[in-house]
Image (cartoon, coloured by chain):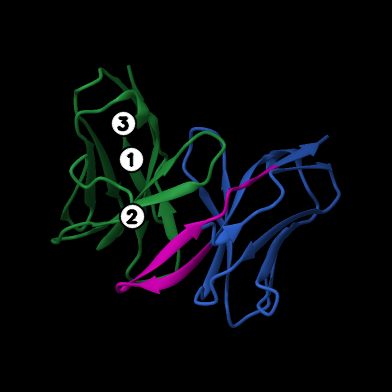
Chain colours: A green, B blue
Amino acid sequence: GAVVSQHPSWVICKSGTSVKIECRSLDFQATTMFWYRQFPKQSLMLMATSNEGSKATYEQGVEKDKFLINHASLTLSTLTVTSAHPEDSSFYICSAYRTVGNYGYTFGSGTRLTVV
Amino acid sequence: DQQVKQNSPSLSVQEGRISILNCDYTNSMFDYFLWYKKYPAEGPTFLISISSIKDKNEDGRFTVFLNKSAKHLSLHIVPSQPGDSAVYFCAASAKSGGYQKVTFGTGTKLQVIP
């Protein structure tokens, strides 16, 4: 089955530093990947859509300069949280959309970011 | 504006009985609906889906029902097992900018009591 690997699983960083989260599709090519954020006891909120070879599409209210997305290949998308602050602490999850085969989205295992 | 709503934040069911999780949506453009199961600090796991042209889809113990006129769908788990205890997210998708954009509900925490 389709597997999406997300790394790291958890990260603690100091306020003001940047953190990069990787999302890889391991056994299929994903021209489109999605980045979500989940606050405790809340829904998964779509942050942005990452398109291979082009600029990401950000949802309303998401700062594109703060959450940098790069989708350089058909199997890798990265989310960089720049100049992180404690309010950026959250659970970030990526998802890959298959272009062929069964319809469905496969999610990564998520990254718990804590900014101290 | 919450386009996908799960009005029950939690549900407790006895092992062996039926679990019914409900979901309502407002956007008539949604053409595909999905249910995901999620454990804390993990990504969602796909359970079952249904196209808007169908009213029922069954996969083992899981059945999803769709009532388009009421903009309502439900997930039935029969029989419920303790391992089913998790948060269940309803999701709906619609075409947006060349891809299917997925909107999630707020989740229902299911507890199956042994």
Residue type marked 2: Gln
The mark that comes first in sequence, 3 or 2, is 3
* Residue A49: image location, x then y, percent: 29, 57
Q: Which residue occupies 23% across, 49% down?
A: A77
Q: Which residue is tagged 3?
A: A8
The mark that comes first in sequence, 1 or 2, is 1
User: Looking at the magenta stretch, what is its main secondary structure?
Assistant: strand
The part of the image, by quadrant, that contains residue B68 is bottom right
Question: Can residue B54 be seen here?
Answer: yes
The part of the image, by quadrant, that contains residue B2 is bottom right
Q: Chain of mark 2?
A: A
Inter-mark Cα distance, 1 to 2: 24 Å
Q: Residues within 10 Å of mark 1 (few under 14, many from 20)?
A: many
Q: In front: mark 1 or mark 2?
A: 2
Q: How many marks?
A: 3
Q: Secondary structure at mark 2?
A: loop
Q: Residue A60's mark?
A: 2
Q: Where A5 sits versus A58, above or below? A: above
Question: Can residue A29 be seen here?
Answer: no
Q: Which residue is tagged 1?
A: A6
* Residue B86: image location, x then y, percent: 64, 40
- Residue B52 is left or right of residue B61, and the answer is left
Callout 1 and callout 2 share a chain: yes
User: Magenta segment, which residues?
Assistant: B92-109
In front here: A15 or B11?
A15
